[in-house]
Amino acid sequence: QTVCVVGLGYIGLPTAAILASHGHDVIGVDVNPRHVDEVNEGRVPFIEPDLETVVAGAVARGRLHAQAHMPWADAYIVAVPTPFADTYDVDPRHIKAAAEAIAPQLRGGELIILESTSPPGLTEQMGQYILDARPDLTLEPGEHNTLYLAHCPERVLPGRVMIEIVDNDRIIGGVTDEAAIKARDLYATFCKGELLITDARTAEMAKLVENSYRDVNIAFANELSIISDRLGIDVWELIELANHHPRVNILQPGPGVGGHCIAVDPWFIVAAAPEEAKLVRLAREVNDAKPDFVLEKVMSKAAKFREPVIAALGIAFKADIDDLRESPSKAIVERLAGEVEHAKLLIAEPNVDALPSSLADRPNVELASVEDAIERADIVLVLVDHHEFKTLDRELLAEKIVVDTKGLWR
Ligand code: SAJ
């Protein structure tokens, strides 16, 4: 079977590589020529453990090939970005472009799977984009010109993608029952988890609900941290104690919620049901406001110094990754650099070699080793629980003012 994977990013490329290593002939399509070239050389344009080995092997055996133009294939897997527009509703432009590129290639009988995170209805909308371009085709099953359309959301955790892509259970949402069965048969060739069949809308919603569940739980933890601060209680001890109850499992507070999934997906639910999605919206607002609380805390400490030196530990969006996108820690540091007068900011981020331009261009900001940053600082601000910080010599912190948003050094 020839499978075409559209979009060779964090999800598309691992999926293409795994399919190729399970006997499929895979063509990866990407609009970025640099991505295409790198993949054809067996390289990966971002960090993900074990991915490069599988990509290089598949390319060397001739099973995986990348190109810019859309080919014909028995099955298409679409994994392009679905960002939100200003209104918090989805911006479907990449889905539309993919659909319009696939449409002219189709002969009837093909399976088309949308993996990108989608608000309820987007899979059907993608089908409509295709049918608008190809009125000679149909979604009605059993005809010579039938297209089989399904939504199979990805649920892999960055950093564990190559394990989770095979081991996780998968939700398979067919626009028709026949499409769901065809999609299930394709995933069965590489997926060891359970393959759970439903309709496309429920599958779309299930993915959004999983990430919202986590967002609501983290918002609860973040609110508890603010309440505990007011009441003079150690929130980490509090949560640890409460979690001993067999039916309680509170997540951890932090400087806010980042990444491109948990901080985005709940908004699709809010956009789809604005009147009803009260708790989902409030959780987003609580998590988005957490950086303000951290900022105020640091500013009140900094006010005691004429020229405060602040060591900021971590700017990634979570522990032990190099991903700075949608990072609340990075946003906090940017605001500190702009808003605290005469402050000097020393940033320790062991996972990057250089600061992003939003920070690098500022005269009062410097990338430093964690030891150097702490030694020179008046205030030490912990923003990410990277493993390098956990094992630090506590002697370094004597006489420092510490603002610890991750409860590392309790
Ligand atoms: N965070 C906390 N406290 C916690 C856990 C996380 O503040 O107790 C913060 C993190 O620091 C980070 C953000 O939340 O800023 C998100 O991190 P994460 O590790 O919870 O999730 P992501 O965004 O890396 O990946 C999530 C995963 N979804 C779930 O666990 C339900 C992953 O399985 C999904 O595939 C991914 O979103 C996605 O692509 O949707």
Image (cartoon, helix red, strand yellow):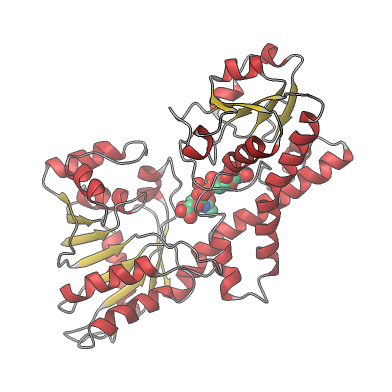
Residue at point 11%, 43% (across, down): 61
Q: Is residue 246 above or below residue 129?
A: above
Q: Left of 27 or right of it: where is 359?
A: right
Q: Left of 341 or right of it: where is 203?
A: left
Residue at point 79%, 44% (across, down): 226
Quadrant of the image for the C terminus? top right
Residue 19: percent from left, percent from top: 24, 53
Residue at point 74%, 34% (across, down): 298
Q: Left of 371 or right of it: where is 230?
A: right
Q: Is residue 382 above or below residue 212?
A: above
Residue 212: percent from left, percent from top: 59, 59
Question: Within the image, what quadrant is residue 111 found in?
Answer: bottom left
Q: Is residue 285 above or below residue 49?
A: below
Q: Left of 192 or right of it: where is 325?
A: right
398 or 251: nearer the eye? 398
306 or 97: nearer the eye? 306
**Residue furthest to the left:** 62
